[in-house]
């Protein structure tokens, strides 16, 4: 019977040791799992931020490129409009000069000016 009590105490010691081992192992694995989960979430957020930052930069570059393209087209249109106005002014000057040369001996300057204004008023621009 004495031996039975010693074995029983030894048996309880093993059970307690096994329970402590399983408890510490469970805590260790739970902490490892928690750390892996936190690391995964942190890495996931970092990758999402990097992706969104890359997309933002790409969009900003595309918008800047598009704005530059619009500005270039606006400058081209402005230059074309200036050339068109310049050509029309030269055309109007040529018409006024011809009218003046044709009538400067027979009409007064006021009459010639009125004829020039009336003639130029009749001109249509841009297919109007």
Image (tube, rainbow, N blue to C red):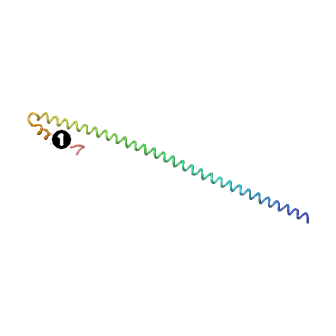
> Residue visible at 15% across and 35% down?
98
Instruction: Locate residue 23 relative to residue 127 in the image: left or right.
Output: right
12 vs 52: above or below:
below
> Residue visible at 87% across and 62% down?
7
Where does the image place residue 68, in percent across and percent down from the top left? 40, 42
Where does the image place residue 25, in percent across and percent down from the top left? 73, 56
115 vs 35: above or below:
above
Task: Give the residue furthest to the right.
Answer: 2
31 vs 82: above or below:
below
Task: Give the residue furthest to the front.
Answer: 110
> Residue visible at 53% across and 48% down?
51
Crowding at mark 1 (Cα within 10 Å: few <14, some 14-19, many 20+): some
Q: Quadrant of residue 65?
A: top left
Q: Which residue is mark 1?
A: 120
> Residue visible at 51% across and 47% down?
53
Q: Report helix, strand or loop for mark 1.
A: helix
Quadrant including the N terminus: bottom right
């Amino acid at each position: 019977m004495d031996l039975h009590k010693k074995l029983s105490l030894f048996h309880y010691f093993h059970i307690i040791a096994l329970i402590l081992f399983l408890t510490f192992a469970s805590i260790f694995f739970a902490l490892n799992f928690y750390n892996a989960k936190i690391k995964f979430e942190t890495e996931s957020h970092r990758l999402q931020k990097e992706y969104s930052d890359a997309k933002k930069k790409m969009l900003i570059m595309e918008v800047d490129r598009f704005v530059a393209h619009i500005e270039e087209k606006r400058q081209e249109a402005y230059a074309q409009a200036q050339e068109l106005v310049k050509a029309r002014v030269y055309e109007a000057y040529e018409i006024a000069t011809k009218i003046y040369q044709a009538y400067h001996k027979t009409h007064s300057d006021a009459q010639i000016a009125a004829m020039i204004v009336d003639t130029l008023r009749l001109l249509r621009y841009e297919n109007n």
